[in-house]
Image (cartoon, rainbow, N blue to C red):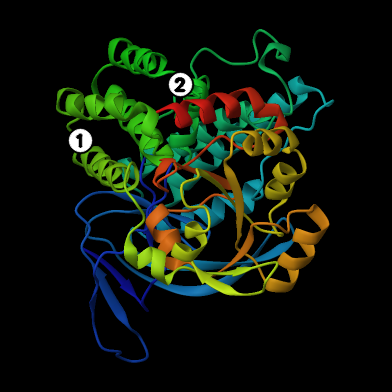
Amino acid sequence: MLEFIDGVSLLYRTLPFDHTEFYRPSPISMPKENGLFMQRFFIESHQAGMISNQRIFISPGDSVFFVVDTINIDNQPRVIFRFSGKNAAHYNWGYMLDSVLGSAPPFFIRGNDITDYRKQILERRDKALDFLQTYRQKHMITDEFYNYAKASIKNEYILNLFNPIRFGQIEKNELPLDYFPEDLVPENDLARRYATTMRQKYFSGFNYWGMTQAEIDSFYRNLIYNFDGQKRAYLVSVLIGILADAASAHYQSLFFRIMGEVPKYVHDPRYLEFIDKALNFYTRIVNNPFPKEVLLNTLLKEYESNNIFTLQEVLQRYKGRPVYIGFWGSWCGPCLHVIRNSQQARTYLKEKGVALIYFANDREEAWRQASEREGITQSQYLLLDFDLLRSHLALRIWPTYMLLNAEHIIVERRAVLPLDDFFAEFKKMLERALTN
């Protein structure tokens, strides 16, 4: 059992995958007493989580109090939760480490010396490890927490090594031969950045957009044959999560075959719970029409007429035609970049008779100005009430583009972006979807 005194509604658990799922255990609420409000959460295993932007490590049996305070990090005030009580050191660790390191790691900029960048992040890692040793001497911490914290530091170092490639600041073939150490193995699936470092290390060449079923299957078989135990179970679970999140119809038979093999390789209850949710999401989305509740209660305002329509009415306008939907917003820099660099894809969609429509999540004035400025006023809609649609599709990333077939059933939930740089992949995806 975990007790929070003064209540907490911001507790969430970071699952050991690329998706963050809100963890809201049903608390037993106690009445206020002496100005305090107590909540009890039943926790059966160690959990890594956050309160606001503060990392915490939770153990069964913890009982903690907190007060809200402010400290300066990088000469900027930051609100923190200062804990006391059993295992409070597991909760205060995050902001105390940030106060030593500064909240942001170095960022590599193209043209800078990559060797100097690597030296900076190595120094940051060693400084964090030194702090952890001092922290261990000063505070009562458990071995579970120590292993978690040490792995978090190592994982962040690995991620920082990959970040220049990840963000397109340098090509892999431009790196010095000794840039990556041999022991780059992410640790502890509850530790911060574990999922991202695992993906960078083992999934860097995986691109389901441009891969055939046979190529995806080959990638999966490599995981099965080259890893074993918990690491294999984890990597198989991540692959299932990626495929489920993309929710593409073109690898449907392979997806269900992989799901059928799960009992052979995955036994951890956490992973099985994640896989079950991934399966439920995939089967709910792929080759299924939008639920009536979503069609009738998603409201959109058309740019040209200023009239309000339901999603069902909007799709009815394109009856019998495939539809490619772009979710965007004027506040979203990547959204605007895609729109400004998508001429080839737009032309190709028109040639193939595929309707291109835009759904904006925005303030109306900003939406109108951006639509006019970017020249996308036709088939342009502002989302007025789309909580049901967002929940149904699990929309988290902007921009997202989605492809519906002529019956308006999703065949690519996370379709290839219409960027000119991705045009070959975009064309391949569209042709595959239209011929199936």
**Residue, x 33% and y 11% (percent of image)?**
226
Comparing 143 with 197, the one in front is 197
Q: Which residue is mark 1?
A: 268
Secondary structure under badge 1?
loop
Kindly state the secondary structure of the residue where label 2 is placed: helix
- The kind of residue tagged 1 is Asp
Seen from the viewer's position, the closer of residues 248 and 133 is 248
Amino acid identity at mark 2: Tyr
> Taking 205 as reference, is 4 above or below it?
below
Viewer-nearest residue: 114 or 391: 391
Residue 155 placement (x, y as % from top left): 49, 33
Instruction: Decide which of 381, 163 is in the foreground and name it.
Output: 381
Residue 153 horizontal side relative to residue 71, left or right: left
Quickly name the residue at label 2.
202
Residue 140 visible here: no
| Picture quadrant of residue 389 | bottom left
Residue plotted at (61% across, 32% down): 160
